[in-house]
Image: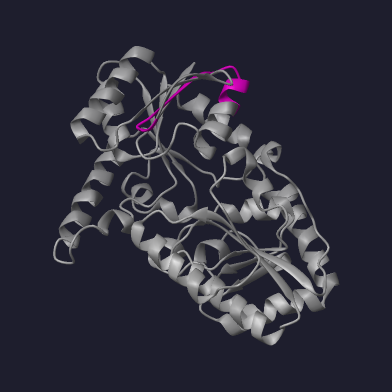
C-alpha cells in the first residue's frame, strides 16, 4: 500500500509527518513518500522517499501543478494532506485514480497570522475567502484526522458522515531525553522555547523573572531561551527586552533539530509558555507541553481552554493568567522553598507522559485508520 504525504507549509522532516506518522507506516510495511513545498530535498531517509521543493513564493497554480505531478509519478493509494492547496491537488489526481484523501488538521485555517498582512478593511473579505477554501478542501477529502476536538469545527459538522479520527500528537520516547532534576534553594534555571514574540509570551516571561529577582535577590537565576524571532519586528522587540533586562546568565540557543529538541533544554528546572490568550491560542493544544512532561519538567503555562479540556496540569505544574506576574513569581519561589513539591511535580510529569501521553499508546490507531481508508 502506497501512502503519499503532501504539505505546503510544513517541512519534509516535520516532527509529526516524518518522525511519527511516516516512520511508523514504513515500520508497518507501507511504501511512503513525502512532498513538501517549504523545504528542498530529494532522497531517501529511513526508508521514506522525499521529494520536496522550496517554492512557497511561487503561485498557487505552480505549486498545485508540482503536487499533481508527484501524485501522478508515485500513484498513491492514500494521500495525507496538511493544507487545502494539497487537498485540491490530490482532488485532481483522484479523477485519474480512485484514491483516499485524508485531511490531517492540526492548524487553524485560516490562522490569524494569515490575516495579519491585510488591512482591517480587507480582513473580513480574506477571512471569508479562506473559509470557503477550507470548506472546499473538506468537501474533496474522504477522511479527516483532527489533532484535537476544537479543530473539528467546522468540517466535522458540515461533513458528519465522513470517517474521522481524533488523535492528539504525543511524543515518541526515542526522541526524549529524560532529566528529572533536584531543585536547589539558591539556584534555578528557567526556560522557554519556540518562537520569540510578544504574543508568544516573551514579555510575560521576563516580567515574572524580574519580580522573582526583586523578591529573592540572593537566588541565582539562569535563563535559557531556545528559539528565535521569525519577524523583523519581533527581533527588534526582543533586543529591546534584552537591553531593558540586562541580566547575567541569559543563554539564547538557536532552534535545534527535532531529534535534539529535548536535550536543548535538559538543564532547565521549570519550563514556561506564557503566550497571550486569543481565540486561536486558547483553542489550540500546545504540543511542547507533552515534551516537557516527557522530559520530567514541571511547567507554568497560560491557562488555555484546550489544555484544561485535555490534560490535568495540576499534577506537574500550574496554569496561570500570563499577565499575572505576581502569581507566577510566587510559584517559582515556592518551588525553590519546597523541594519536595518540585520533586513530586517532576516525577508526576514523566509518569503522566508514560501512562497517558506517548506515541506508543496511539500509533496503532493511526496505522489502522490509514489502512482502513484505502478505497
Residue 199 in sight here: no
The part of the chain drawn in magenta is 24-39
- Horizontal side, residue 142 vs residue 238: left or right: left
Image coordinates of residue 46 in percent, x first then y, are 59, 21
Residue at horizontal 45%, vertical 65%? 238
Please identify the residue farthest to the right as the structure is shown. 340
Note whether 185 is above or below 365 in the view shown.
below
| Residue beneath the point at 33% across and 55% down | 111
Quarter of the C terminus within the rendering: top left
| Percent position of residue 85, x then y | 28, 36
Q: Is residue 44 visible?
A: yes
Residue located at (66% from left, 80% from top): 212
In this view of the protein, which residue sits in the foreground, 215 or 21?
A: 215
Q: In this view, does 10 lie above or below 98?
A: below
**Percent from the top left, x then y, of residue 149?**
48, 54
Asked whether 255 or 300 is in front, the reply is 255
Amino acid at each position: 500500500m502506497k501512502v503519499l504525504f503532501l504539505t505546503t507549509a510544513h517541512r519534509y522532516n516535520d516532527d509529526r509527518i516524518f518522525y511519527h506518522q511516516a516512520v511508523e507506516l514504513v515500520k508497518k510495511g507501507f511504501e511512503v513518500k513525502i512532498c513538501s513545498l517549504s523545504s528542498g530535498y530529494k532522497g531517501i531517509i529511513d526508508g521514506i522517499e522525499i521529494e520536496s521543493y522550496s517554492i512557497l513564493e511561487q503561485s498557487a497554480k505552480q505549486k498545485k501543478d508540482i503536487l499533481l505531478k508527484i501524485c501522478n509519478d508515485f500513484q498513491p493509494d492514500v494521500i495525507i494532506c496538511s493544507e487545502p492547496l494539497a487537498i485540491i491537488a490530490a482532488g485532481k489526481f483522484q479523477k485519474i485514480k480512485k484514491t483516499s484523501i485524508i485531511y490531517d488538521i492540526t492548524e487553524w485555517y485560516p490562522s490569524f497570522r494569515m490575516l495579519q498582512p491585510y488591512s482591517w478593511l480587507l480582513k473580513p473579505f480574506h477571512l471569508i475567502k479562506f473559509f470557503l477554501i477550507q470548506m472546499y478542501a473538506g468537501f474533496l477529502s474522504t477522511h479527516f484526522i483532527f489533532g484535537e476536538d476544537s479543530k473539528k469545527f467546522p468540517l466535522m459538522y458540515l461533513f458528519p458522515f465522513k470517517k474521522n479520527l481524533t488523535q492528539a500528537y504525543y511524543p515518541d520516547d526515542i526522541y526524549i531525553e529524560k532529566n528529572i532534576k533536584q531543585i536547589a534553594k539558591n539556584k534555578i534555571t528557567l526556560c522557554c522555547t519556540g518562537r520569540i514574540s510578544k504574543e508568544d509570551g516573551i514579555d510575560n516571561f521576563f516580567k515574572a523573572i524580574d519580580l522573582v529577582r526583586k523578591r529573592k535577590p540572593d537566588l541565582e537565576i539562569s535563563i535559557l531561551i531556545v528559539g528565535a524571532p521569525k519577524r523583523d519586528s519581533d527581533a527588534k522587540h526582543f533586543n529591546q527586552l534584552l537591553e531593558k533586562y540586562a541580566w547575567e546568565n541569559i543563554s539564547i540557543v538557536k532552534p535545534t533539530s527535532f531529534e535534539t529538541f529535548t536535550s536543548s533544554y535538559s538543564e532547565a528546572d521549570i519550563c514556561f509558555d506564557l503566550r497571550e490568550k486569543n481565540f486561536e491560542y486558547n483553542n489550540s493544544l500546545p504540543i511542547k507541553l507533552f515534551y516537557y512532561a516527557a522530559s520530567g519538567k514541571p511547567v507554568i503555562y497560560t491557562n488555555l481552554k484546550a489544555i484544561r479540556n485535555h490534560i490535568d496540569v495540576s499534577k506537574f505544574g500550574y496554569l496561570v493568567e500570563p499577565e499575572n506576574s505576581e502569581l507566577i513569581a510566587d510559584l517559582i519561589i515556592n518551588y525553590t522553598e519546597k523541594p519536595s513539591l518540585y520533586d513530586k511535580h517532576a516525577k508526576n510529569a514523566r509518569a503522566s507522559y508514560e501512562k497517558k501521553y506517548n506515541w506508543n499508546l496511539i500509533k496503532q490507531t493511526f496505522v489502522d485508520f490509514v489502512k482502513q481508508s484505502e478505497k
